Image (tube, rainbow, N blue to C red):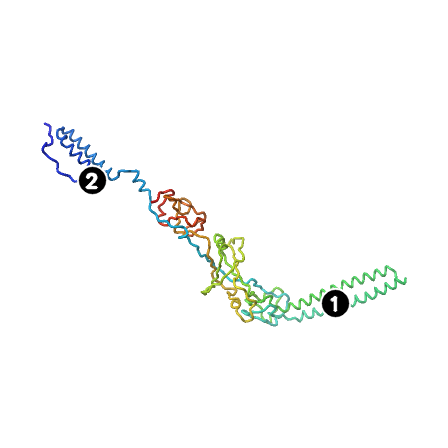
Amino acid sequence: MNRCLHPTASPSPVTLPPARRPVAQRMQATLPTLAALPIATTTLAAALLFGLLSASSALGQNTNPQTQAATAAATSVQTARLDSVWLQPERSAAATVLARNESRLSAEVGGRVLSWGADVGATVRRGHLLLQIDPTDHELALQRAQAGRDAAMSRLQLGLAQLQRARDLVAQGFFSKEALTQRETEVALQQAELASAEAQLRSARRQLERTRVLAPFAGTVVQRTAQVGETVAPGTPLFVLAESGAAEVQAHVPPAEVPGLRRAGAWQFQPQGSALSHPLRLLRVSATVQAANRTQAVRLGWAEAAAPGAAPGTDPGAATGTAPPGSSGVLRWRDPQPHIPAALMVRRGDALGIFVRQGQQARFIGLPGAQEGRAVATQLPPETLVVVRGQAALTDGQALN
C-alpha cells in the first residue's frame, strides 16, 4: 500500500529571503498535488524542487556574471598630476680646489745653495727671490765669455782695416784680386767668430741669472726641498709653488649625471667643515671617461670676480672671497629637468616605468634608462595623470574605477 502525504496536513510556515519567495510560493502551490503522487514520484519531485531552490539562491547572489566580472576587474587607484609629484633632484660630488698652476721649480744650474727667500706657506709675488745658488763659477764663465767676445771684436776690426787697405792697393794696381778675395774671406770668418763669441756671452749671462730662482707667478709656497749649504745639480727639485687668485674646482662625476650637470643653472661649492657655499661657473667637462673610477672630470671656476694677486702674508682665499687651493669639499647642483620619483616606478617584464590613467584604463609607460631606487628624468607633459597609489597590482590596459 502506497503511503501518501496526509491531505489535511498543512506545511509549517517558512520565512524565506525576498529572493526566494517566488520559489516558495510555487512550492506551496505544488505540495497539494504531490500528495496524490506515489512515493517514488514524490521523492523525485522533492529533489527537483530542492535543486530549483538552490539554483534560485545562487541566482539571487549572482544574477549577472558578466557584470560581476567587470566589477572585479575594475580597480580603484589614486592618481595625481605629474607636475605635482615630480622633483628636481639635487646632485653632489666630492670636489677639490686646485690651483690653475702648481709648478715644481727645479735648479737649472749646478752649485751650492747660499740662501732661500721663502718657506712653506709663504705668499710671494711674481719675481720674488726664492733661492740663491753660489754664482762664483758662473761669474767666471761670464768673464771668459766677455774676454772671448772682445778678442773676436778686435780681430774683426783689424781684418776690416786690412781689407780696406787691400781694396785701395787693388785700385792702384799694387794688389792682386786673388789676394783681395783672401782678405774678404778672412773678414767673413772673423765676423762669424764674433757672432759665436757674443752667443757664448749671452749664454754665460743667462746661466748666471739662473743662479737666482725667482717666482714665475704670484702664489703660495707649498713645499721647499732646498737646504742652505747643499750642492744641487740641474734638475734638482727646489720648491713647489701654487698660483693664487686663479684656482679652479675639480670634481669627478658619473657619466649619467653629466647631462644634468650641464643643464643646471647654478653650482655651489661647500668647503669641508664650513656652512658657507661659494657660487661657481662651469668651465669644461672632460670628453673622456677615466678607466679607474668610471667618471668624467669637471672643472669649474669661481663666479665671484677674482681679485688681483694677494699681498705677501695674506690668505689667498680671503683676497678673493673663495676657498684657497688645496681645500676639499662638496660640489652641489640641481638638475632643472623634472624627474619621476623612484617610489612611483614599477617593473613590468624587463622594463621599469609608471602607470598613467588614460580614460578608464591604466597604461604602462616604460622609462628608458631608469634604475632601481633612482629618480629618472622624463619628458611627459605636466598634466599627465600618474598612478601614485595602487600601481603595484596594475596591469597594462586594466580598467579603473
Residue that carries the numbered disc 2 in the rendered image: 18
| Foreground pick, 45 / 248 | 45
Residue under the point 83% across and 66% down: 161
Whether label 1 touches label 2, CB < 8 Å: no
Q: Position of residue 337 (x, y in %)?
A: 46, 53
Q: Secondary structure at mark 2?
A: helix
- Quarter occupied by the N terminus: top left
Q: Position of residue 251 (x, y in %)?
A: 50, 58
Answer few, some or many: residues within 10 Å of disc 2's Cα (few below 14, many 20 plus, some between 14 and 19). few
Q: Residue furthest right?
A: 173
Residue that carries the numbered disc 1 in the rendered image: 149
Label tally: 2
Answer few, some or many: residues within 10 Å of disc 1's Cα (few below 14, many 20 plus, some between 14 and 19). many
Going by the numbered disc 1, the residue's amino acid type is: Arg
Q: Position of residue 340 (x, y in %)?
A: 42, 51
- Quarter occupied by the C terminus: top left
The vertical placement of 378 against 114, above or below, is above
- Say whether disc 1 or disc 2 marks the residue closer to the N-terminus: 2
**Drawn side of residue 46 relative to residue 202, left or right:** left
Going by the numbered disc 2, the residue's amino acid type is: Pro
Q: Position of residue 301 (x, y in %)?
A: 53, 61
| Foreground pick, 370 / 235 | 370
The vertical placement of 78 against 326, above or below, is above
Q: Secondary structure at mark 1?
A: helix
| Foreground pick, 67 / 228 | 67
Of circles 1 and 2, the one toward us is 2
The vertical placement of 306 against 395, above or below, is below
> Could you give the CA–CA distance between mark 1 and mark 2, rounded to whole angstroms?
134 Å
Residue under the point 48% across and 52% down: 256
